[in-house]
Amino acid sequence: MDVEAFAGRFAALEEAIGDVVLGQETPVREVLIALLAGGHALLEGAPGLGKTLLCRTLARTLGVGFRRVQFTPDLMPSDVTGGNVWDDRQGVFTFRPGPVFTQLLLSDEINRAPAKTQAALLEAMSDRQVSVDGETRALPWPFFVVATQNPVESEGTYPLPEAQLDRFLLKILLVPPSAAVEASLLRATLDGFDAADLDAQAVPLVADAEQLKAMRDCARAVEGSDEVLTYIASLVRRTRNHPAIALGASPRASIALLRCAQVVAAAEGRSYLVPDDVKEMARPVLRHRLVLEPDAELDGLDADQVLEGLMGEVPVPGADAA
């Protein structure tokens, strides 16, 4: 697959999902970028903004298996990974796969589960395999996790530690739609739209697993000049010595930023990186990997605002020539 074919397929995926999930163009784009860059996504937004609908629609457009797990304080690791169950008829233990054995897994309200259950999922995300009673089982390909968390409620939650947040390629923010989009949602509801019945929406199959792999390989082939690679490294390194940041991003973040920028370039029909590809993905790649200084938080700053100022401090390749 060449970049022109990639760009056409990517646009078709955006359109097919956007026809169902109204008013969330940026989250739709970023979820696709995370998938094609080979990582996982953390969605943050208030209830009712379409997080589940987005994932279900994505699964339909790709024709992949989809499972949803509602994380709760009493959820055990085996409820996610599966476990060995005694079979009375055969007199042996047999493995019963958990919901993690799918291709697209929605982990709803991941911060409501205790640390041990969170860790079981994050291990599967990292290694693409599950180990139970000394036996390792590979997960299907593609394996893509979309986890959600509610930014408002804190009671009864177990916030993800920074080391676990770092396992997510992107943190994607969902915001309420505009008045015009909300009116369109109401019109669609009057016309018979039911988010629980995607069969009635005729969601098209845009790409299958084989085409998805070809798209991922195409994105990985996008070239980057030494100047752009230095720009990525400089952005990430600046998070480690910024006065408003107590803990900056690791080299894993540099690789994540590169992979996501490659997808952006391919989606634009280019086989090479430009600084704008990097700048587009800097906030979703880095926002969850930073720990701000207490003074910055007291001043009302959030990670996105700090990153906006930080990007203004790092020289952009070619800016002087322009």
Image (spheres, helix red, strand yellow):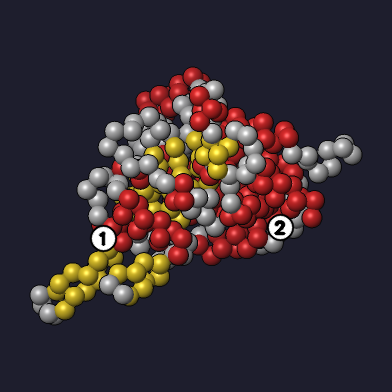
Lateral position of residue 47 relative to residue 289, left or right: left
Residue 7 versus residue 175 in the image, above or below: below
Q: How many labels does the image show?
A: 2
Image quarter in which the N terminus is found = bottom right
Q: Mark 2 points at which residue?
A: 222
Describe residue 284's horizontal placement relative to residue 268 as left or right. left
- Mark 2 surroundings within 10 Å by alpha-carbon count, few (fewer than 14), some (14 through 19), many (20 or more): many
- Judging by the rendered image, the residue that carries numbered circle 1 is 78
Name the one closer to the observer, 114 or 228. Answer: 114
Query: Which badge, 1 or 2, is on the more N-terminal residue?
Result: 1
Q: In which quarter of the image is residue 79?
A: bottom left
Across and down, in percent, residue 140 comes to: 42, 66
Tell us which disc is closer to us: 1 or 2. 1
Q: Which residue lies furthest to the left in this view?
A: 88
Image height of 42 relative to 182, above or below:
below
Residue at the image position 49 percent from the left and 19 percent from the top: 179
Whole-number angstrom distance, CA of label 1 to CA of label 2: 40 Å
Can residue 202 be seen in the rendering of this structure? no
Residue at 67% over, 47% down: 237
Q: Residue at x 33, y 33 (%)?
A: 154
Picture coordinates of residue 17, whole percent (x, y):
50, 42
Amino acid of disc 2: Val
Q: What residue type is labelled 1?
A: Ser
Determine whether, in the image, residue 5 is placed left or right of residue 102.
right
The image quadrant that residue 29 belongs to is top right
Could you tell me residue 3's position as x and y percent? 70, 56
Q: Residue furthest top?
A: 179
Instruction: Say which quadrant the C terminus sits in.
Output: top right
Q: What element carries label 2?
A: loop
- Residue at position x 58%, y 55% in the image: 252
Task: Kindly state the secondary structure of the residue where label 1 is placed.
Answer: helix
